[in-house]
Amino acid sequence: LSLQELHGIFPWLVESIFGSLDGIIVGWNLRCLQGRTNPTEYSVALDFLDPSGPMMKLVYKLQAEEYRYDFPVSYLPGPVKASLQEQVLPECSLYHNKVQFPSSGGSGFSLALNPFEYYMFYFAISLITQKNLPVTHHVSPSNSAYFILVDTYLKCFLPTEGSVLPPPSSNPGGAIPSPTPRSPAVPFTSYGMHHTSLLKRHIAHQPSVNADPASQEIWRSETLLQIFVEMWLHHYSLEMYQKMQSPHVKLEVLHYRLSISSKHHGSPAQSSYQALHAYQESFKPTEEHVLVVRLLVKHLHAFSNSLKPEPLSPSAHSHTASPLEEFKRVVIPRFVQEKLYIFLQHCFGHWPLDASFRAVLEMWLSYLQPWRYAPEKPPQSAEPLPRSVSEKWAAFIQENLLMYTKLFVGFLNRALRTDLVSPKNALMVFRVAKVFAQPNLAEMILKGEQLFLEPELVIPHRQHRLFMSPTLGGSFLSSWPPTITDASFKVKSHVYSLEGQDFQYKQMFGTEVRNLVLKLAQLICQAQQTAKSISDHSAETMASHSFFSWFRFTPSEMNGSYTGNDLDETGQDSIKKTDEYLEKALEYLCQIFKLNEAQLTQMMMKCGTVQDENGKKQLPDCIESEDGLILTPLGRYQIINGLRRFEVQYQGDTELQPIRSYENATLVRLLFRLSSVLNERFADQMEVLCAREDFVGRLCRYHLTDPHLMQKIRYSPMVKDRASQKWGPRISLRFLASYRTLISLLMIYFIASWFYIGPVGCTFIILIGYVLYAVIMTFFFEGWKPHER
């Protein structure tokens, strides 16, 4: 095919592979394509889309001819789309000189992209647009063709060793030129500062046979990274994030959500907030999306850490440092830091309180530990001691202080609302505590906080955003700002550039956060006690299984109380893991925040882990009022998580309680009618007999249910006094409707038949035995009632 024909089919080919932007055309479905289930298609796709494969060769061939392809602005991330529609040029240089007016009859702005940009735009955005894909089998995101291709492109265009491989050229000895700048097609104003590109200091933007090969790796590396960051992270703007931190705006958000949920009336604030809400919260990242971002973060750490040591002579540095080396030096603070911080803040505040948050958590922890991806190897030792964080990482920690401190507080608030008895939730608390407990890390974070809290002397307020704004002119290739030697100024610039000048910093090692940690430690103690209770309860349940369990009959069902817990189905192995995770997490928290044994003991006392004299758990935490007991927030937490409970028993007429699963409904109704007839006819005689003080009276009181002998029990916590109805002595035959009683009688009659004892004789023997048993029990236990067994 000729180049003109290839140019014509290129957009169709890209859409056929990655799917359409509206998600209607699925394409090759790379996110669900795995080598385990479709080995042939999997290998063909990877070979075809490889950086040195046929598809990329086509891209470079079209790149040499400087073709352009339109990409609709309407499918860009929300903040970018909103700013372009307002004719404000984004800071990111990726959009500069590319915005096109809608053509006659067109329906919106578009970007004029070169073939490499067009290909990568589609590749990156397919992670977002192709959400509802047909899946016929379990898909592991980390084994999909898409995930492998992301890893391959990162290793090729952002290499940790050597240089980027030069692109294949159809012109022998020639070089594929970097994109030529185009004059703006729309008069846009930029909310960023325009700086001369560093690329222009190295090469010209026009084709040159003798061009420096380093130019090729620079523009492709920068373009790839910008596209990935923009498509995957830039779904929440910094300005909107800072506005959302205002208490007034938070109140507007609350009113807006309430009006949406009720849909009874509209408020003036609704229309003003609706536009704000439209692109700030509508995007919901998936777990797969977060895993891909984590892959990007890990590779960028490795890429940045592969920077060659700086030469001793400053003049040598200026002559020998290649563009790729300079790119490594600033790739994280200029490209990733701001957008990843806001992305994480959104995830911490909006992600469901379930185990899927583990993906977000691991991505955050990966960013916090760049030393894990450093080329040097830790020294080998006989004992696997935790590796101390080197002082050389102090600058990274200080310049990313909010990533450590504010997000840690955000995690604390999430952990306080989760069920820590769940092994997956306990594991997340353990992982965070283990990372922050690394030797020397807490001290460096504390040092960063101290630098931020140092009083300002001559720092102009308006310069905070200038020095540390990650994008500045939108490109790494912008002219360099002056070197900032004041560490305190660096930290302040980082914080104020992300949170705004009015930000009230909450110290990680301050009193308020320490109280949250103490509350978390208290919940950990409660969760450990709950896990132990569940384990003990499960063991007792297994030991008490009998033949009658087939009839769904258990002791708890007999007295009308519920003693189980929703977590009873948790296996013993999971409970053991939960206890191990929580124990280690508590130990790490004590190391980080210097909690002492006295505080832990006090917390355990507050948790109610100390049992009372009878070996039973105390009642939920309550306060006394004129209306009776009222549950405190701690008491509600104890009931929800099964730590404590009120004894729930049926308090009405025992004859009228609901029919149980272990009773025969027909017999219950027939025996109730028979008992009612007998009680109505002989009520006076039974009252007289029970009133006697001799042996006959005691025997009658034992046989006939007497409400005056019922034990005092605690009712609902909101009811102080309860009016009780007085029932006189009466006969209750309901126990004969129990399957257990019926099966027992059948077994007795069956065994008696072996000894040639007929039904009448067997019945007489049963009655004689019961009378003798009742006489003995009457002598020793007058208050014991067979009807309540």
Image: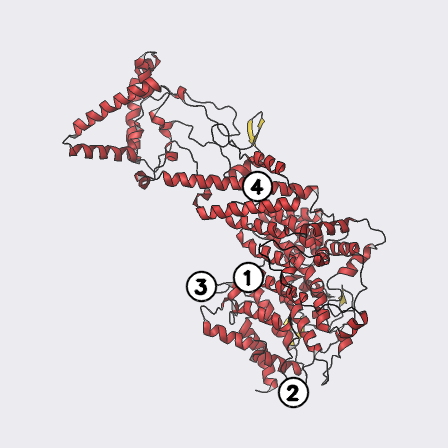
- The colour scheme used here is secondary structure
Residue, disc 4:
523
Identify the disc placed on residue 4. none
Question: Total marks drawn?
Answer: 4
Residue, disc 3:
137
Q: Residue at x 72, y 66 (%)?
A: 329
Q: Nearer the viewer, residue 625 or 438?
A: 438
Could you give the CA–CA distance between mark 3 and mark 1, rounded to whole angstroms?
16 Å
Residue, disc 2:
171
Q: Place residue 730 in its image quadrant.
A: top left
- Quarter of the picture containing the C terminus is top left
Does the image show residue 721? yes
User: In the shown orientation, is residue 252 left or right of residue 610?
Assistant: right
Does label 1 or label 4 sit earlier along the sequence?
1
Mark 4 or mark 2, whichever is nearer to me: 4
Inspect the image, locate mark 2, and give the three-letter code of the amino acid beneath it.
Asn
